[in-house]
Image (tube, coloured by chain):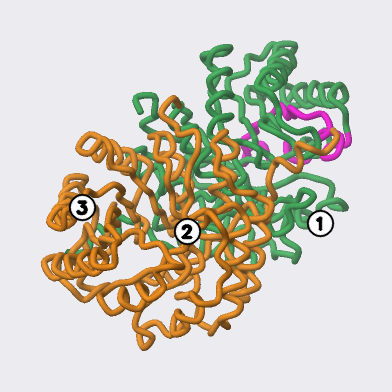
Chain colours: A green, B orange
Amino acid sequence: MSDRPNTVEICEKGPREGIQIEPGPIPTDRKIALIDALSGTGLKQIQIVSFVDPRRVPAWADADAVVAGFKPRAGVRYSPLWLNEKGLERALRYKDRLTFRDAILMSASEPFLVRNQNSDAAGNARRQHNLVALLKASGIPAESALVQAAFGCNFAGDIPTGALIATIEQAFDIANEHGIELKRVSLNDTMAWATPDTVKAAVGAIRERWPALRINLHFHDTRGLGIANAYAGLEMGVDSFDSSVAGLGGCPFAGHKGAAGNVCTEDLVFLCEELGIQTGIDLEKLIEAARLAEQVVGHPLPGSIMRGGPLKRLRQQPH
Amino acid sequence: MSDRPNTVEICEKGPREGIQIEPGPIPTDRKIALIDALSGTGLKQIQIVSFVDPRRVPAWADADAVVAGFKPRAGVRYSPLWLNEKGLERALRYKDRLTFRDAILMSASEPFLVRNQNSDAAGNARRQHNLVALLKASGIPAESALVQAAFGCNFAGDIPTGALIATIEQAFDIANEHGIELKRVSLNDTMAWATPDTVKAAVGAIRERWPALRINLHFHDTRGLGIANAYAGLEMGVDSFDSSVAGLGGCPFAGHKGAAGNVCTEDLVFLCEELGIQTGIDLEKLIEAARLAEQVVGHPLPGSIMRGGPLKRLRQQPH
């Protein structure tokens, strides 16, 4: 337990990941209401929007209006998702309101890249070079990378730790060519292949190779192991996690219809609190935001603690 | 990881815990169909029925018919729940078909005993003496105890490890007075207060005090930590767990309406498989039983892997 962090940073992904998967249209002002509720909980990082082709993702046709409309709160960083030059150029118009994180987008599985980004590994590397250059031209160093399918892929099977390391190596190479030092890598378990053992193995191998690199973990709960994987990460000293309020997000991949999405933010905050790890987040306010998320999407979401209730309340009762 | 067991025994609680909480009546033959499906998955322990007052729990008014009707499968032990002398006497009529496990029923929280069993600690101890004597008269040694609210209680707060140890001590005393040596204790996290840390602390303290005592863990997923707690137990070498197919069970306690129930059996089996721990259970057959459970209760149940799908299937695909 000595490796555990004292504090963790949680990056909220619900507004971006959750909204793109919803079948019905969600009005712009409801998206903004959710973002503004989340920024009032103590969360310091919120991914709020996706600058993608509105023909492919109609749910984000109003990306500009959402970015223009939310109320920036001091100390909170709001970030966009982009997949290509066009998306990044659109996002850069709002660079006074947005933070550009997870700048170098890699995949440990080439079959996943082909299916999800319509690109092979070489094509993706070329694109990432272009994106890093675009960011640099705007004065933004691309210091963080994101590895999709970091633990396994429905189309490629298990990802050996060596293949994950090689993928991160490529991200370092891309950054280096632009004179940038990579400071952070996010391991995204896009299709829910991670287990506590593979999490520990991956974190251990990255630590050994790049001791100064900050690791972020992003889990999906599609196979029920999300919180156990986060716990394994905490045991390894990881102090940065992605999650989604109320478990917003679902899983858009083949064969997972109806499956749970991202690890739920309030459940992760509850775990941290119970382990004595600070998050800076007000769990009661976050639960209110989770209830709002259910109202915004118009159906129940998979979060647990919003139904079970935190223990703090019960501890404060007279017994 | 060296403490991990090579094999674990999973005791299925879904038929008993799941059915009592369902609002609508479930026909006897559907209960039996679920039990018979479960016994075909490789599960070796199934709690199938509750001999309780049918005025209080109408869902089990047909307990006798269920016990008379299931098809016993060689190597599978079927067990009942009872709470008092009358219930045990009813169950003992079927002692050729049933196994009497979790024989000494304790609670680490007295307020919970008062609310759930309408008895204080002294009254419960007297009742347990009577029940152990009844079992002994039928030739059944009460070698296993169950501690409710082992980690915390909505009506009493956190249960310190010392209070848990004292409760188990009382169970030993009861068994000893009848010349029986307690061999097994089940720690039931009845109201979902356990965390990975308190699981490790409790298991460690029991091991130190009674090195030969076999520990069983029973978690509820009401606050989303069920699988993480099971993982913590496995890390401590615990090799016996209760769970419910499809996550059947819910939580009948105040303030938890709509909350998840017991840890889901197929999610637990998936975790074990991925960690290389044998369960003897066929995960695909178990998922079929989970789907049947949803049909039997007539609404979706919270299990994850029945939706996300196991990884074995995807590994076997050509890539």
Choose between B38 and B302: the one closer to the eye. Answer: B38
Q: Residue at x 35, y 78 (%)?
A: B90
Quarter holding the N terminus of chain A?
top left
**Residue found at the far bottom of this picture:** B55
Label 1 neighbour load within 10 Å: few <14, some 14-19, many 20+: some
Q: Does the residue at mark 2 contact the one at mark 1 (Cβ under 8 Å)?
A: no
- Residue A123 rendering spot, x and y as whole percentages: 88, 25
Label 3 neighbour load within 10 Å: few <14, some 14-19, many 20+: some
- Residue B221 rendering spot, x and y as whole percentages: 45, 56
Q: Which residue is mark 1?
A: A58
Choose between A28 and B35: the one closer to the eye. Answer: B35
Q: Which residue is mark 3?
A: B180
Mark 1 is on which residue type? Pro
Q: Which residue is mark 2?
A: B77
* Range of residues picked out in magenta: A90-118
Dot 3 falls on which chain?
Answer: B
Question: Quadrant of the rendered structure where residue B256 is?
Answer: bottom left
Disc 2 and disc 3: Cα gap in Å?
Answer: 21 Å
Quarter holding the C terminus of chain A?
bottom left
